[in-house]
Image (tube, rainbow, N blue to C red):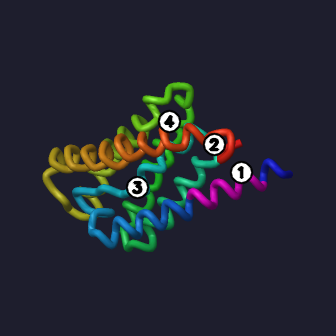
Amino acid sequence: MKKNVRYMTQAAMIAAIYVVLTFLANLLGIANGVIQVRFSESLCVLPYFTPAAIPGLFIGCLISNIVTGCALPDIVFGSLATLIGALVTYAFRKYRWIAPVGPIAANAVIIPFVLLYAYGIQPLWFSFITVTAGEIISCGILGMLLLFALERYRSVIFR
């Protein structure tokens, strides 16, 4: 029972932090569109520490996409991209340096098509470049900084 409560609490906290960080990026005008640097995507390394991050990230992304006014395909497929990235991070959790690769790859492949079909943003190749660059910044750089900062407190935060 205690383990389930801890799992749900961690997932809910991760979802809430994801939403807050997305709102912050949205206020700065960098959360949506062709060039996206969502600070919340740095949290996509958290499945390295806990499986509770998987539903937390998915629900956080889903809520963020809904409340920031994204188109329906973006709500569905953007959230699925985050879910896929979280699952890949968890699957390769033994390899610290691979933690951001799943989210970067999932978003780099899925989001350009979302931008094309949901918003009509062209050319597709440009979206591949800009989405990948945004993910490298938010998940690759900021995410790895977060991972190294949390590594020290792993046993306290994610027991």
Label 4 packing within 10 angstroms: few (<14), some (14-19), many (20+):
many
Q: Secondary structure at mark 1?
A: helix
| Label ID, residue 51 | 2
The residue where tag 3 is placed is: 78
Alpha carbon distance from label 3 to label 2: 20 Å
Q: Quadrant of the C terminus?
A: top right
Say whether disc 1 or disc 4 marks the residue closer to the N-terminus: 1
Name the mark nearer the viewer: 1 or 3. 1
CB of mark 1 within 8 Å of CB of mark 4? no
The answer to whether residue 13 is above or below residue 55 is below
The residue where tag 1 is placed is: 7
Place residue 129 in its image quadrant.
top left
State the residue in front, 80 or 55: 55
Name the mark nearer the viewer: 1 or 4. 1
Say whether disc 1 or disc 2 marks the residue closer to the N-terminus: 1
Residue 23 sits inside the magenta stretch: no
Query: Hey, what amino acid is under mark 4?
Result: Val
Say whether disc 4 or disc 2 marks the residue closer to the N-terminus: 2
The residue where tag 4 is placed is: 88
Magenta stretch, residue numbers: 5-14
Q: Secondary structure at mark 4?
A: helix
CB of mark 4 within 8 Å of CB of mark 3? no
